[in-house]
Image (tube, rainbow, N blue to C red):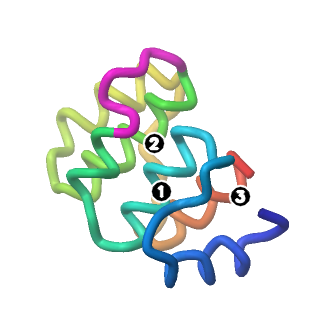
């Protein structure tokens, strides 16, 4: 993927690109509206990048306590952004 628009355009596809990281696959599935599959991509991983995406997913779910736990694991604080803005920032961060 070259840029955010190309990533967004790929949401028309049936499946994410095989070359995407677990974090980007999670964000891809989330972009398709498939929260459960998005969560499965990072739920079992223990690195800070996965924790960051995991936090976002729980924030989106509305489970703020759990989201804040994962933001802490990612050494981040919950952003004061819309979910769409955070999603875009995460995609750009992990590209």
Quarter of the image that includes the N terminus? bottom right
Residue at image mark 1: 27
- Dot 1: few (<14), some (14–19), or many (≥20) neighbours within 10 Å? many
Identify the residue shown where x is 28% and y is 51%. 37
80 is within the stretch colored magenta = no
Q: Earlier along the polypeptide chain: callout 2 or callout 3?
A: 2
Q: Is residue 75 left or right of residue 82?
A: right
Of residues 16 and 83, the one nearer the viewer is 16
Q: Which mark is residue 59?
A: none
Residue at image mark 2: 53
Tell us which disc is closer to us: 1 or 2.
1
Q: Earlier along the polypeptide chain: callout 3 or callout 1?
A: 1
Tell us which disc is closer to us: 3 or 1.
1
Label 1 – label 2 distance at C-alpha: 8 Å
Identify the residue shown where x is 59% and y is 66%. 88
Measured from the top left, where is residue 76 in percent x and y? 52, 31
Q: Is residue 22 above or below residue 47?
A: below
The span picked out in magenta is 41-47
């Amino acid at each position: 993927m070259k840029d955010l628009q190309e990533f967004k355009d790929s949401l028309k596809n049936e499946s994410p690109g095989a070359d995407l990281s677990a974090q980007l696959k999670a964000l891809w599935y989330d972009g398709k509206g498939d929260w459960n599959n998005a969560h499965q991509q990072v739920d079992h991983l223990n690195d800070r990048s996965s924790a960051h995406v995991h936090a976002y997913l729980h924030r989106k779910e509305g489970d703020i306590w759990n989201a804040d736990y994962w933001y802490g694991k990612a050494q981040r604080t919950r952003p004061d952004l819309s979910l769409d803005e955070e999603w875009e920032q995460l995609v750009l961060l992990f590209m």
